[in-house]
Amino acid sequence: MRYKLAVATSLSATLWLGACDRPPNSSLSPSQSAPPAMSPSQPSQSPGKKVILTTFTVLADMAQNVAGDKAIVESITKPGAEIHGYQVTPSDLERGQRANLILENGLNLERWATRFYNSLPQVPHITLSEGVRPVNISEDAYRDKPNPHAWMSPRNALIYVENVRKALGKADPVNAATYDANAATYSQKIRAIDKQLRQAISAIPPNKRYMVSCEGAFSYLTRDYGLQEVYIWPVNAEQQATPKQVEKVINTVKANQIPAVFCESTVSNEAQLQVAKETGAKFAGVFYVDSLSSPAGPTPTYLKLLEYNVNTLIRGLQDN
Ligand SMILES: [Zn+2]
């Protein structure tokens, strides 16, 4: 069933990026076909295998691609969960007790995790954004703090994968060679996606290259791909837009005649629907940022998530 769905979603994804986005015979690659082992209910019962816990689903997929079948990878937060304001549960702590390693994003994303780590002093945690050149947030309570969404640019993802490779090799040296090989294969796929996205975006007329979202989650993607970023609030913490934030986006959309606006899968669309109503722009869909979809949804893997967002953007801008 999962294979069937994966094929269906890849067809829709190739609609906009062309059929050349995937080399032949790669349909069974880990990133395409094997949803990350992120179900909290899934027991970690493979004797001898290390248990790698990640803070959210995107990191679980990256880690799963590096781990292959040599380690158990689980995400603390479930698909669809809001990750900025997450609250650790007792069962998370139980899973933490079984973990050999925790992989986090860093850049102030997991502010909820400090207590978690304090309860698990024996489990090392590794920050995957280490080495990324941060983009700072320019307003509100987050002014001058790094934007946490570094994974949203494939260029940064290569840094994340290298950090996963090193962390897994250190935690489980017996399988280090496999992790090295898997990381190399996965990095190649990320480079291929990077190239496709770049080509797809280059087809958008330069004066239309606006990515209007609810959360300011695209600072790294827009920086690396020559897009303009417009958003209502900088970080999904409160998820309550102020009238001033909404007005600012309305003015920007009007001034630049931006045809399409978007929101994210993990938050309410309400404020952005208001922007659409007051500007005449079309509300053209949701982006996936802070979470993968369920395996049956449109973005079961990180690579699918990248494709889906750019396809959604291009379709929204072109339909007008
Ligand atoms: Zn976010």
Image: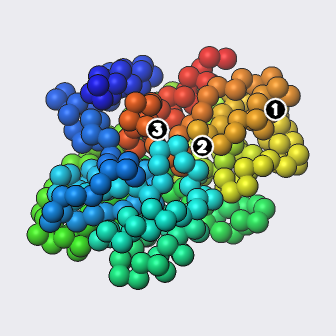
Whole-angstrom CA distance, mark 1 to mark 3, is 25 Å
- Looking at the picture, how far across and down is residue 192, in whole percent? 32, 40
Q: Are marks 1 and 2 in contact (CB under 8 Å)?
A: no
Give the residue displayed 14% in from the left and 58% down from the top: 178
Please, what is the three-letter code of the amino acid marked with disc 3?
A: Ser
Q: Is residue 206 left or right of residue 243?
A: left
Mark 1: few/some/many CA within 10 Å (<14, 14-19, 20+): some
Q: Is residue 110 left or right of residue 11?
A: right
Mark 1 or mark 2, earlier in chain:
2
In which quadrant of the rendered image does the N terminus lie? top left
**Residue 267 or 180: which is nearer the viewer?**
267
Secondary structure beneath disc 1? helix
Residue 266, label in figure: 2
Give the residue displayed 52% in from the left and 43% down from the top: 80
Ligand 1: does it lie within 8 Å of the C-beta at label 2? yes
Does 276 appear above or below 294?
above
| Residue 111 in view, yes or no | yes
Residue 274, label in figure: 1
Q: Please count the marks in the image.
A: 3
- Looking at the picture, how far across and down is residue 260, in whole percent? 68, 27
Residue 293, label in figure: 3
The label nearer to you, 1 versus 3, is 3
Ligand 1: does it lie within 8 Å of the C-beta at label 1? no
Mark 3: few/some/many CA within 10 Å (<14, 14-19, 20+): many
| Residue 212 in view, yes or no | no
